[in-house]
Image (cartoon, rainbow, N blue to C red):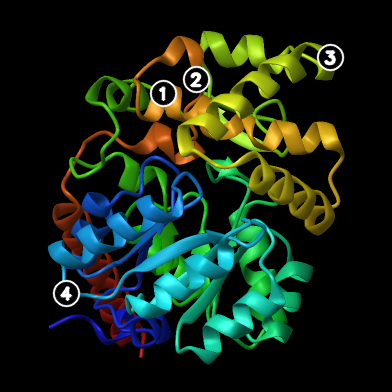
Amino acid sequence: MTHPALHTALCDLAGVRYPIVQTGMGWVASAALVSATANAGGLGIIASATMDLRQLALAIAETKSRTDRPFGVNLRSDAPDVRDRADLMVKEGVRVASFALAPSERLMKGLKDQGLVCIPSIGARRHAEKVAEWGADAVIVQGGEAGGHTGSVPTTVLLPQVVDAVDIPVIAAGGFFDGRGLVAALAYGAVGIAMGTRFLLTSDSPVPDAIKRIYLAKQVTDTVVTTQVDGYPHRVLRTEFVDKLVQTNAITSLPRAIANALRFQKMLGTPWRELFREAIAMKRSQELSWSQVVMAANAPMLLKASMVDGDVAAGVMAGGQVTGLIEDLPSCAELIDRIVREAEEILARLGARAGEST
């Protein structure tokens, strides 16, 4: 029987057994990974930003064929077909909607009205307060240790700040990989943990084995935060390619970003009219310059080069500082079972000590 402390508000909200979330990582959070997470008792989230509508429909269908347990889909609110994606999620009975970057109040409320659980990700207290006012069911708080898009405030500082600021359940992200982290997050007042890098480094992850071995060889100091991936602070693994990327400037990086943006458009088959609409929406909603808009389209291709094609010389590998603490590639079932077992042992030990002191 699971320790009572491990059945939290997140379990009830998402309909999962354990308060553990696998985040929506582009090119990584596939139907195979999401369903494996769901079958193991966690909340798996499909990454839709690197899919067109048809591919998302196929991913949802495949996930449903692999599991009868709840799962989620990560959305970009500024996607031109976001309404169609939302309708698809409602039609297919997706349980949870999470959001990349800034969520839309209107979109979130519309999904909530259709019965979906809405869980935005944030990196600052003011953002948590805003989405709480909009009616978010819970919020994922991502500290600066995390991979991919990240902020500068460590999880141990940001997490208690947000827990004290909002009245909705808070899920901790950034630096988590084991049962100790889960117990620590619960002690801070969170209702669970969300992990990206740890799930990327499982046997169920679609990332090429050669790339996974590169991750396993890295130390905690082998990541760097740069804006040269897509204009936002982005934590990636240090490689020869990344070191050169960090040293570039807007003048030298913009041509490459334009070329990658065009390749991304061709790969998804997005009509030019929709691509232009998406660019305008992104510029307005996130108050970006045109150069930042172009850079935003650069990221998917740089990530695809490594995460899908296995080409380290031409791509980046998003990863948190926790990469340096991970040493193996368990299945999702083995990973979640291990985390829960470790957490229960710690909780039992702490309970025994408390009993001894009374």
- Which residue is rendered at x = 33% and y = 83% of the image? 5
How far apart in space, not on screen, are marks 2 and 1 (Cα)?
Answer: 5 Å
- Residue 197, x across and y down, in percent: 40, 43
Mark carried by residue 151: none
First of labels 3, 4 by sequence position = 4
Please say if the residues under marks 3 and 4 sit with CB atoms less than 8 Å apart: no
Name the amino acid type tagged 3. Answer: Ile
Q: Which residue is mark 3?
A: 251
Q: Does the CB distance between marks 2 and 4 fall below 8 Å?
A: no
Residue 107, by quadrant, is bottom right
Judged from the image, the secondary structure of the residue bearing numbered disc 2 is loop
Q: Distance between the Cα atoms at labels 2 and 4?
A: 35 Å
Whichever of callouts 2 and 1 sits on the residue coming sooner in the sequence is 1
Q: Amino acid at mark 1?
A: Ser
- Alpha-carbon span between mark 2 and mark 3: 19 Å
| x 68%, y 23%: residue | 257
- Circles 2 and 1, Cβ within 8 Å, touching? The answer is yes
SS at badge 4: loop
Between the C-alphas of marks 4 and 1, the distance is 31 Å
Residues at badges 2 and 3 in contact (C-beta under 8 Å)?
Answer: no
Give the residue at mark 2. 315
Left or right: residue 167 compared with residue 355: right
**Quadrant (top left/top right/bottom left/bottom right) for the N terminus:** bottom left
Q: Position of residue 14 (x, y in %)?
A: 36, 80
How many angstroms separate mark 3 from mark 1 (CA)?
Answer: 24 Å
Amino acid type at circle 2 is Gly
Residue toward you, 15 or 323:
15
Q: Secondary structure at mark 3?
A: helix
Q: Mark 4 — residue?
A: 68
Residue 101 position within the rendered picture, expressed as x and y whole percent measured from the top left: 65, 56
Q: Is residue 165 above or below residue 236?
A: below
Q: Which residue is mark 1?
A: 306
